[in-house]
Amino acid sequence: MTEPENFTAQQAADPSTPGQVLADIAALRPELRAAVASNPSAYPGLLEWLGSLGEPTVDAALAARAGAEQPTVVLPTLPPVAAPQWQGQATTPAAPAPAYGAPAPGFEPQAPAYGAPAGYAPQPGQPYGLAPAGAPPKKGGNKVLVIVLSILGVLILLGVGAFFAIKALIGNVTDQLEDIDVPGITEGDAYGDNAELDALWDACETEDWAACDDLYFAAPIGSEYEAFGETCGNRTEASGGSCVTDMGGGATEDTGEDTGSDEPFGYGDDATLDALWDSCAGGDMAACDELYFSAPIDSEYESFGDTCGNTAEGGAACASSTTTGEPYNYGDDATLDALWDSCAAGDMAACDSLYETSPVGSIYETFGDTCAGLQEAGTTLWCDPNR
């Protein structure tokens, strides 16, 4: 995210400054909002947002902008139509009168020398620009909206079709696999039917979590072998073949190395997270919060940061409020606390609102930016997919 001090008053007033940069300036530099409101390149959505702030200097700039004279187009007066030219002599009998609405014979009206369509009036150009994080989002033109909706419609149709096609394919493959009689590891339904699966069952029962996962993947679909391996020996809910990770790690018979996932889990797995761990253990509560938000979900890193270095029960931010007087951490502001609670409960729109309305650099902002820890800080995507 752009540092506020990098913006200047010249950028705020310069018509060549992109709309996205103007939105950044308005969000991060309140003292330059009046200059942004007077900038001809400020797009309508940004002006509407500025008008909602209730700041006198900004309102005055918007009023001056609205009172500026708009160019008008004066249509020229059309020249008179030339009189019709009649053919024939006076003694020639007059031709029958033309039918109602038809031109008289020989009538050739002259085209006007200059004209403009009635009701034409120039439309002012619409500035555009992307609204950055922390400022009101850009409202694109109708053309862009139509294109985006068309693309989304096509993707939805393709996605629905692909879903049913894959579902049918999986069903066919499953039916074929169930009909295949492969000797050895794939035979048998319950304990006692297959010696190899029985051996894995016995090892899983003695808390060999790798054996539980092997039993789950090797067993026939829908068998008791599969269910026993998936539940880590009837100890947990269905794990989906992740007993090694869910039950606290495990070791292989060959190397004794950890068989968990490749993501960093505990101290020593990641130098950056180790540094945050050390700072947190030394009493740096902001480092504890950063460790919590940066660590993989359910890892020892996350637990250590969540508990403020094993000094608290967890579930609340560790850092205390700053000395600036602005709300910084949970408990400093009732409105931001309510958004925090809704965000933590899974309301992604509340996470976006918390990020937009909280002070820059605060724990409130970080919590909203990470969608309550579901994504890394600084990600450009909004938490609410419908935004």
Image (tube, helix red, strand yellow):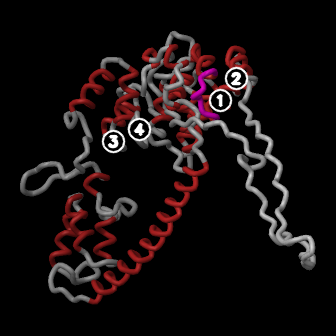
Rendering coords of residue 250 (x, y %): 20, 52
Q: Which residue is mark 3?
A: 296
Q: Which portion, as a residue range, is magenta?
A: 38-44
Q: Viewer-nearest of labels 2 and 4?
A: 2
Distance, label 1 to label 2, CA atoms, is 10 Å
Residue depicted at 81% across the width and 54% down the height: 82
Q: Residue 40 colored magenta?
A: yes
Q: Residue 123 colored magenta?
A: no
Q: Which residue is mark 1?
A: 47
The quadrant of the rendering that contains the N terminus is: top left
Q: Which residue is mark 4?
A: 379
Quadrant of the image occupied by residue 305: top left
Q: Is residue 303 left or right of residue 334?
A: left
Residue 241 vs 39, above or below: the answer is below
Badge 1 vs badge 2, beta-carbon distance below 8 Å: yes
Q: Which residue is nearer to you in this view: 23 or 119? A: 119
Q: Which residue is mark 2?
A: 65
